Amino acid sequence: MSRTTAAFAASATVLALLLAGCGDDSSSAEASAPATTPTFQVEASKAGMFVVSYRNAFPKLAQGRDDAAVAAVLNHSCSDIKAGKSEADTIATVLAAAENGDTAATTEEATAIYQMAKLMC
């Protein structure tokens, strides 16, 4: 229950930052992908906000990962969203991309990550 609250708080923070306008950064985030390279690259400023929110909301999933690996979760999610895949299919992608060694995301966590990604794409 506290992870859900943290995820929603992170999502609210991300939304507030987006609405406040953090500036326009047209460069794309370079991210290594867990399995395949995503077809969509999120702006660096948005990827940075996602990384901070992800690390705060999901510390076990972020542990030992560099920023590029965390940003790859967002890029994979956005690739699916932009390709018109269903929410269920995109959440399945999030589950695979968020996996961190022996630590796997729950469906609840993957859904929260999906919601955060939708705001950024």
Image (cartoon, helix red, strand yellow):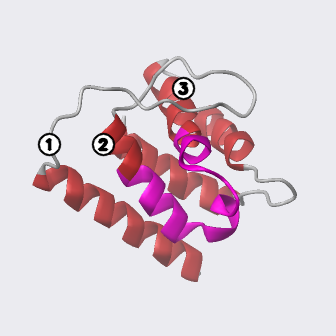
Q: Which residues are magenta?
A: 49-71
Q: Is residue 43 left or right of residue 18?
A: right
Is 103 situated above or below 39? below
Q: Residue at x 63, y 21 (%)?
A: 37
Q: Label 3 belongs to which residue? A: 80
Q: CA distance from mark 2 to mark 1?
A: 8 Å
Q: Is residue 104 left or right of residue 94?
A: right
Earlier in the chain: of badge 1 and badge 3, it is 1
Q: CA distance from mark 1 to mark 3?
A: 25 Å
As drawn, the label of residue 23 is 1
Tag 2–tag 1 contact (CB < 8 Å): yes
**Does residue 91 show up magenta in the picture?**
no
Q: Residue at x 12, y 55 (%)?
A: 20
Image location (x, y in percent) of residue 59:
62, 69
Instruction: Bin the neighbour count of mark 2 within 10 Å (Cα to Cα): few under 14, some 14-19, many 20 and up.
Output: some
Image location (x, y in percent) of residue 75:
51, 32
Give the image quarter of residue 89: top right
Is 21 situated above or below 11? above
